Structures are given as structure tokens and as C-alpha cells.
Amino acid sequence: MTDVVLDGVDKVYPGGHAAVRNVRLRINDGELFVLLGPSGCGKSTILRMIAGLEEITGGDLWLNGTVANDLPPRDRNVAMVFQEGALYPHRTVKGNMMFPLEVSGDDRAEASAKVVELARALGINTMIDRLPRTLSGGQRQRAAIGRALIREPSLFLMDEPLSSLDAGLRTELRVEIAALVRSSGTTTVYVTHDQVEAMTMADRMAVLRDGVLEDVGTPEQIYEDPATVFVAAFLSSPPINLLQATLWAVEGQGLMLDLGPQRLTLPWDDPRASALISHQGRPVIVGIRPDTMMPIAPGSPAPSGTVLSGQVRALEFHGHEWLAYAEAGIPTVDANEVGRPERPPVLAEERAGLRDRVRALFGRPAEAQEPAEEHAGHHRRSDLVFRIAPGGRPDRGERVALAVDLDRVLFFGADGRRITPVHR
Ligand SMILES: Nc1ncnc2c1ncn2[C@@H]1O[C@H](COP(=O)(O)OP(=O)(O)OP(=O)(O)O)[C@@H](O)[C@H]1O
């Protein structure tokens, strides 16, 4: 059993790349804690620093109340499983799982009984005499997890252990891994870039971007009450609508969100009004999840300032639901570009260079270029995305009115941080 504290931890790789920046985090004893973020955000680096495989260049790592920055990996009692859990190819599943116990000189009969019991819990008891190459990817990962857990580590670290498996197996294994580590009570840090995996498995989770911690909390807290626009967007599937607005206080009406050609109004008695008023006259980002907008019959009564409208441009069938995309003329925001430092100009040049090279490759003449998208800065997509309840599906080209559940709308400043207080 162990708890882990990262106290202002930095990682600057040789060559100067700052992969992890001032991360402050507490992972409690027995917790299944998930590190989530896009590729390159520093998740694996954090995991490797906890394991002692990567030097910490700033701040402190505490393991069970002791600073462990310089503790050798073998003294941390940590077990780790990677994307492709490496097994010894010439040892059977049982031989692989026995190995850590043999090294520590455990009694053979006891070790064997323990391996059989854990193999049963992992659902691989019928294949313990087989060699790894005769197993499927999922079975190999189970064996690798078994080998890591067999010596009862204080801390279990998993780096994208399911990412090489197909979707069905991933779903099955994530349920089993979560149940197994919970029943063992081992503090577990699990790295993934898959938000569904994170939300379904985690007791608590952290969301990272560019080496910086954006948010920490339970999956429900982070989904319902995200700290930043990046977190709200990263955890939203289908994508959250992020609308560019200017906020105005209007006497007798409330807080008016000027969305260009359309408006929403928050009444004065809304509990968020007092925090929002500080942004009077300033740009804000309005976050509306697709399930918080409901199509209503045109002209049907709705409180003023609660309806958006648009023309249906596309419909998508997702099996359990339909999604619709409606052109509403409202400027939208790209979450990836909000609240992050400006990229150096050289990157933009490199990108243009790549585009030119691809064009040259496919022989596209320069005059065949598509017209430039009409957006400035962050404005890209200009559709409203909403869910459609079974039954009343609009047609493509039809105008729709959408009642917005204002209580569930999220408000962010232009820096991408939530304007209203975040509760943890
Ligand atoms: N040994 C290294 N030397 C220099 N830079 C490195 C090294 N290892 C990682 N990086 C850089 O540090 C950043 C974080 O890498 P890291 O592997 O921790 O990200 P990640 O979130 O785990 O990504 P992924 O999901 O793709 O594995 C990346 O920009 C990566 O290129």
C-alpha cells in the first residue's frame, strides 16, 4: 500500500524540452488513478518518474510520506505494465508469472498455488502451460498483468496496456482490470489517451495538456464541472459546442450572451450571474453539450433567450441515436487553441511547407486551392451539434429551433478557464 505525491514536479529532457511542468498531484492509497491526455502531453513521463526510470529535474516525488526522487527503482516496490506487456518467449504463462517469485526465492509450491489462483482471476487458468506466442494479444496482456501483480507490489503502474487490442477486447479487459486492482487494494496509476477508458475505470483522474495539469477529480466532477475548456472538449463525445460570445448586462432582462446573429439570456436570479458579471463587455466561451439542446417545434412557446436556431446541414446515424449538425452562423472556438502558449512562428511555416509538399505530391495546381475558411483565430467549425430523440428526425435543409438547457451550459473566459467556481 502506498500513496504518491507529486509536489511541483518538472521534467526537462536533455535538449531542453519541458515535458512536465510544475505538476502537483496526490494519489491516495488504494486508488485507481488515471492520467489522461492527448499524445505527447507527458503522461508516460510522469509514470516513468514515479517508477524511477526517469530522472526528476524539478520538484519532489513522495512515496508513502518519504521523498523518493533518488530512490532506485528496485527499492520502490513498483510493478509496471506497458502497451505490449513483454513476456519471456521461452517460458509458459505459468513460468512467466512464477518468475518474480522465483527471483525473490519464494517457496515453489506456495508460489505455484498463488500463480494458479491469480491466473484464474485473470481468466487465463486454462492456458497457463502455453507459450506467449500461442496466445492472443488480450491473453498476453492478462499474463503480463499477472506477472506484474503476482509479487503484490505497493504501486502498480500501467502505461496504455489496452491500446494494442481491438475495441471489444478493450471494453472487456478494462472492466476486469478495474475489478482486479480494486479487489487487490493496490494503488494503481493508469495512463491512457482514451477518455472512455479513463471515465469508466478511474476513481479519480487527472487531465494533462502540454505537460501541464488541467484538472483533477472524479470522472463525474471532471465531466460535469470541468475546470477548462480543453477538459470539457477532451471529455465530450459527441463534441461539446463551444460558442464565441460577448457578455452584456441588460437591465430588466439579465445577462445577455451575444453570439453574433443569435442571443441567449441568463436571468439575474441564476446562481452563476454574480461570477459572470465580472466579464461584462468581454468575450466568453459558451459550452453547450449536444444533449443539452432539444429540437422544439418551430413557434412553440419557450422562455425568451433560451432558444438557438439553425439549418440542418448533416445527419449522422450512430445506432443508439442520431446526431445533427446545423449551420447557425455563430462563431465557434477550437478548444485546442485556447489557453495554450502561442506556438513559435517556425511551426506555422513548417506546416505550410508540409501542405505544399503534399500538394506537389498529388499534383494539385495552386489555383485549385479551396477558398480560405472564414475564421479568425480560433473560429473554425460553425455548426451546432445536437442529439435527436428517436422519432422526430428533421430533414437535411430544414430549419430547427433548439431549446437550450441553460442550467447545464458552461461558461469559460477567453483564457479557457471556467468563470464560475469549480467544485472538487
Ligand atoms: N527521452 C526523451 N527525450 C526527449 N524528449 C522526450 C523523451 N521522451 C519523451 N519526450 C517528449 O516529451 C513529451 C512527453 O512525452 P510522453 O511520452 O511522456 O507523452 P505521452 O503523453 O505519454 O504520449 P503518448 O500517449 O504518445 O505516449 C513529448 O513531446 C515527447 O516527444
Image (cartoon, rainbow, N blue to C red):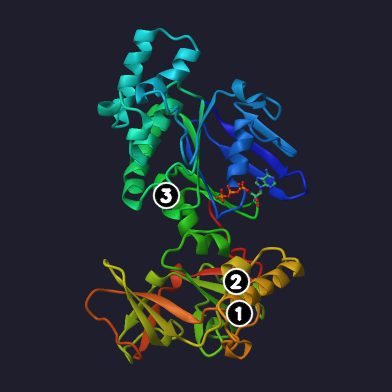
Label 1 belongs to which residue?
247
Q: Going 61% across and 37% down the picture, which residue do you hit?
A: 48
Cα distance in 3D space between marks 1 and 3: 36 Å
Vertical side of 392 occupied by 25: above or below: above
Q: Nearer the viewer, mark 3 or mark 2?
A: 3
Determine whether label 3 and label 2 are within 8 Å by CB: no
* Residue 118 at x, y percent in the picture: 34, 24
Label 2 belongs to which residue?
276
Q: Going 33% across and 46% down the picture, which residue do you hit?
A: 169
- Whichever of callouts 1 and 3 sits on the residue coming sooner in the sequence is 3
Vertical side of 363 occupied by 350: above or below: above
In the structure shown, which secondary structural element does the residue marked by tag 1 occupy? strand
Q: Left or right of 214: which side holds 196?
A: left
Cα distance in 3D space between marks 1 and 2: 8 Å
Determine whether label 1 and label 2 are within 8 Å by CB: yes
Q: Going 25% across and 27% down the picture, which residue do you hit?
A: 126
* Residue 75 at x, y percent in the picture: 61, 20
Query: Which class describes the residues within 10 Å of circle 2: few (<14), some (14-19), or many (20+)?
Result: many
Cα distance in 3D space between marks 3 and 2: 34 Å
In the structure shown, which secondary structural element does the residue marked by tag 3 occupy? helix
Which amino acid, by three-letter code, is at mark 1?
Leu
Label disc, if present, on residue 197 of the rendered structure: 3
Q: Nearer the viewer, mark 1 or mark 3?
A: 3
Which amino acid, by three-letter code, is at mark 2?
Leu
Instruction: Please indicate, yes or no, whether residue 259 appears anywhere in the rendered image.
Output: yes
Which amino acid, by three-letter code, is at mark 3?
Glu
